Amino acid sequence: MDLGIRGQVALVTAGSRGLGRAVALELAREGARVALAGRDPKVAEQSAKEIAAETGSEVVGWRCDVSRGKEVRELVNRVADRFQRVDLLVCNAGGPPGGTFDTFDDDAWQKAFETNLLSVVRLVRATLPHMKDGGRILTIASSSVKQPIPGLILSNTMRAGVAGLMKTLSGELGPRGILVNTLCPGRIATDRLRELDLQKAEREGLSEEFIQRQSLQGIPLGRYGKPEEFARTAVFLLSRANTYVTGTSLMVDGGMVQAL
Ligand SMILES: NC(=O)c1ccc[n+]([C@@H]2O[C@H](COP(=O)([O-])OP(=O)(O)OC[C@H]3O[C@@H](n4cnc5c(N)ncnc54)[C@H](OP(=O)(O)O)[C@@H]3O)[C@@H](O)[C@H]2O)c1
């Protein structure tokens, strides 16, 4: 199947490590020109260099904290200056901290809102003028879009907002040939997942291995996913081979979520 990605310009935020990096790498493997970003410019630059060396594609790595409106606007302008267009937008950010309702004050809620929901609004707003020939927008959310995860109240709330935003945008942008989807990781083996497992183990006074075994019991495929498995699904949704999937929240979860 020809994915039609060669030569397309992709912007992947929070693309310097973890799932975002895996998506940037798969896009570059398919011949996209990729701009990836993260808060630490050195890590972003290093990842871009590694991906360019591995794939032979043009890849740049720049600083952007997606919770800051000014930085988002500057990033998108920089990408547009460099490549003259943006065809594929991947909105990703680091996940908010774990905790329950009584753990968080207004500041924590505001930070989660700006990082995980308002960032998507700002990225889409800044990018749309540069999507000259239709386009694809993909947001990385969480399986909590279908089934909230105990102890992750900030994430559960913001992800639901993102899913609502994306669904609405799919209706508004469909007539312009822009397909908009939400991709929902279940448990994909990245540093962030390891951190969450460790935190849970500490909270409950159990070992990390026990917590992992517990999680695996709820996953029909019996293992955590690999970042590249997640990224391959992302690449299809972002590709020109995807001509009719829009407005969807798609689970990449090994069958974990029980919702129909
Ligand atoms: N892995 C899973 O199984 C899983 C499950 C459900 C949901 N998710 C969600 O999927 C997203 C990616 O997860 P991951 O596992 O890849 O996380 P990760 O390994 O922690 O990746 C974090 C990446 O995000 C960047 N980042 C963090 N905060 C940022 C910000 N404010 N602005 C720009 N970049 C930022 C980091 O770079 P800098 O530190 O340099 O900024 C890094 O590149 C997160 O939102 C996570 O909550 C993941």
Image (spheres, helix red, strand yellow):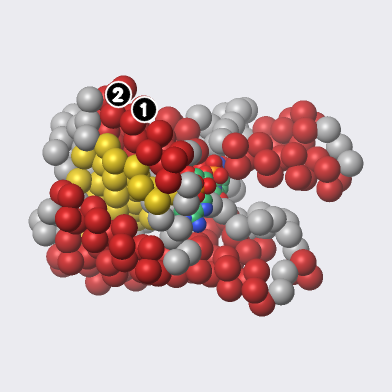
Determine the residue located farthest toward the left in the rendered image.
133
> Given the image, on which type of amino acid does mark 1 rest?
Glu
Coordinates of residue 87 in the picture (x, y in percent)? 19, 51
> Camera-side residue: 153 or 89?
89
Q: Are marks 2 and 1 in contact (CB under 8 Å)?
A: yes
Residue type marked 2? Ala
Q: Which mark is residue 53?
A: 2
- Which corner quadrant holds the N terminus? top left
Q: Is residue 122 above or below residue 227?
A: below
Residue at figure coordinates x 62%, y 28% from the top left: 222
Q: Nearer the viewer, residue 111 or 190?
A: 111
The residue under the point 45% across, 58% down is 65
| Percent position of residue 83, x then y | 16, 49
User: Residue 202 sits in which quadrant?
Assistant: top right
Q: Residue at x 22, y 65 (%)?
A: 128
The image position of residue 101, as x and y in percent, is 74, 69
Callout 2: helix, strand or loop? helix
Task: Tell whether 117 sits left or right of 70.
Answer: right
Q: Which residue is mark 1?
A: 50
Residue 109, above or below 250? below
Q: Quick one: which residue is furthest to the bottom in this view?
A: 106
For label 1, the SS is helix
Residue at 83 percent across and 33 percent down: it is 207
Q: Which mark is residue 224?
A: none
65 lies left or right of 112: left
Q: Is residue 81 visible?
A: yes
